[in-house]
């Protein structure tokens, strides 16, 4: 394939930011709204995953709310207090 066409193919490939709100919300759905599973996909600690979900006000599942609700709400309150 000529070099020019290879560059066009590369340009067509979009780079997806996994921390983008829409992508994160969709991935949380794909993970069956399970913070622990999603954190494994993202290769991070559940705490970090909760911080990302809270940052974008992505609602937790009932199970995640029971397990992580206190921390999730504290992160949201902190972000709202400091305008982050």
Image: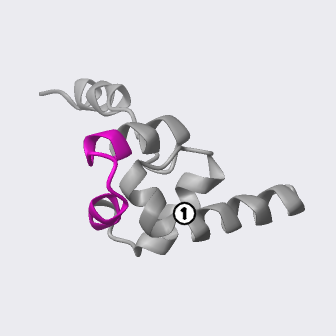
Residue 59 to residue 66: above or below: above
Q: Quadrant of residue 81?
A: bottom right
Residue 22 percent location from the top left of the image: 49, 34
Residues packed near mark 1 inside 10 Å, few (<14), some (14 to 19) or many (20 plus): some
* Residue 33, magenta (yes or no): yes
The residue shown at (18%, 27%) is 2
Task: Please indicate whether residue 55 sits to the left or right of residue 41 in the image.
Answer: right
Quadrant where the N terminus sits is top left
The residue shown at (45%, 62%) is 66
Q: Quadrant of residue 6?
A: top left
Task: Please indicate whether residue 83 sits to the left or right of residue 39 in the image.
Answer: right
Residue 65 to residue 9: above or below: below
Residue 35 percent location from the top left of the image: 37, 60
Q: Nearer the viewer, residue 69 or 53?
A: 69
Residue 40 to residue 62: above or below: below
The residue shown at (32%, 69%) is 43
Quadrant where the C terminus sits is bottom right
Task: Please indicate whether residue 53 sits to the left or right of residue 57 in the image.
Answer: left
| Residue placed furthest toward the left | 1
Badge 1 is on which residue?
69
Q: Nearer the viewer, residue 16 or 20?
A: 20
Q: Which residues are magenta?
A: 28-40
Q: Quadrant of residue 29?
A: top left
Tally the numbered discs.
1
Q: Nearer the viewer, residue 64 or 18?
A: 64
Residue 16 percent location from the top left of the image: 41, 41
């Amino acid at each position: 394939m000529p070099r020019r066409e290879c560059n066009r193919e590369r340009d067509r490939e979009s780079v997806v930011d996994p921390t983008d709100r829409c992508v994160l919300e969709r991935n949380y759905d794909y993970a069956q709204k399970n913070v622990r599973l999603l954190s494994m996909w993202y290769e991070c600690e559940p705490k970090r995953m909760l911080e990302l979900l809270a940052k974008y006000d992505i609602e937790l599942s009932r199970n995640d709310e029971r397990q992580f609700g206190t921390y999730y709400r504290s992160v949201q309150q902190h972000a709202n207090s400091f305008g982050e």
